[in-house]
Image: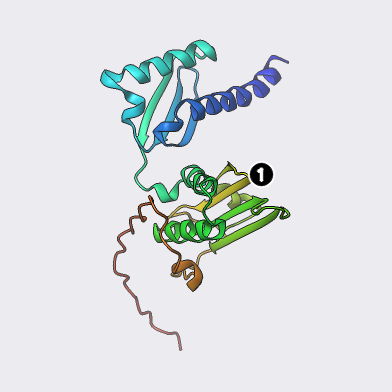
Amino acid sequence: MLYADKLIEEPIVKYQIMKYLEQKLDRAGLASVDIQRTPLVTRITLEVINPARIIGKRGKLINDLTDDIKKDFKIENPQISVIEVKQQFLEPRILAKRAAKHIEMGKKVRSILHYFLREIISAGALGAEIVASGVMSKGGRAKTLRVLGGFIPKAGEPARLVKEAHFHAITKFGVIGVLVRIVPPGTVFPDKKSTHVLSLPKVITAAETIEGEQPAVRPSVAPSVVKSEPVAK
């Protein structure tokens, strides 16, 4: 019975820690939280845009955060490590939050989705999907806008390789949910071996840049080498 209680309790504690860190480190641009519990320590890895906001002067902020987690969640010997996000357009949580912010500012939802999809694919993602659902106009009904590019598995074991995040925008018409799903570069699917250059519709490639947003850094692509093999006669 004790093992069963522990099996149920651990995921709940991990979820509570993740929600606590998301609220606490929101201004630091938190992208993801990874928690691994071992018999000796609990390793918490944070991926953020601005690590200095978490570490603080002489590590004071990160030490205070470690003490708070140890006290509030009764975790012995927590160890927090901070990793800087290199490519923001490959992090679903950051993009979902940004898209929601632009929607709250009154910008066109479809244009926002087109812009972010273009930048995600330009950053090297193998596939991406952005969905916005809710009431988007005065007196209108709830509807769903979806933009998709590349390969996105929806079911089975390959779906576990997809990174996703959900955020909501509160507008004067109601609440609009934003879902971002991304297949990171270098992801290998057991049932998909062919690789090809992704092509997006013109309406997405021609999307206007949103004010205040920096375009994605294009990955450097090494020249491809074509090997010729003898054909069996």
Give amino acid for label 1: Gly
Quarter of the rendering occupied by the N terminus: top right
Return the x and y of residue 70 as percentages of the image width and height.
48, 13
**Is 173 on the left or on the right of 208, as rendered?**
right
**Element carrying mark 1:** loop
Residue drawn at (33%, 58%) of the image: 219
Colouring of the image? rainbow
Residue drawn at (51%, 14%) of the image: 75
Return the x and y of residue 34 as percentages of the image width and height.
48, 32
Q: Nearer the viewer, residue 137 or 67?
A: 137
Q: Nearer the viewer, residue 153 or 107?
A: 107
Relative to 53, say whether 171 is above or below: below
Numbered-mark total: 1
Residue drawn at (34%, 35%) of the image: 50
**Is 80 on the left or on the right of 129, as rendered?**
left
**Is 141 on the left or on the right of 116, as rendered?**
right
Q: Nearer the viewer, residue 206 or 135?
A: 135
Name the residue carrying label 1. Answer: 174
Circle 1 crowding by C-alpha within 10 Å: few under 14, some 14–19, many from 20: some
Residue drawn at (39%, 32%) of the image: 28
Return the x and y of residue 146 as percentages of the image width and height.
61, 59
Q: Is residue 110 something one can see in this rendering? A: yes
Return the x and y of residue 178 as percentages of the image width and height.
58, 48
Q: Residue furthest left?
A: 58
Q: Is residue 195 something one can see in this rendering? A: no
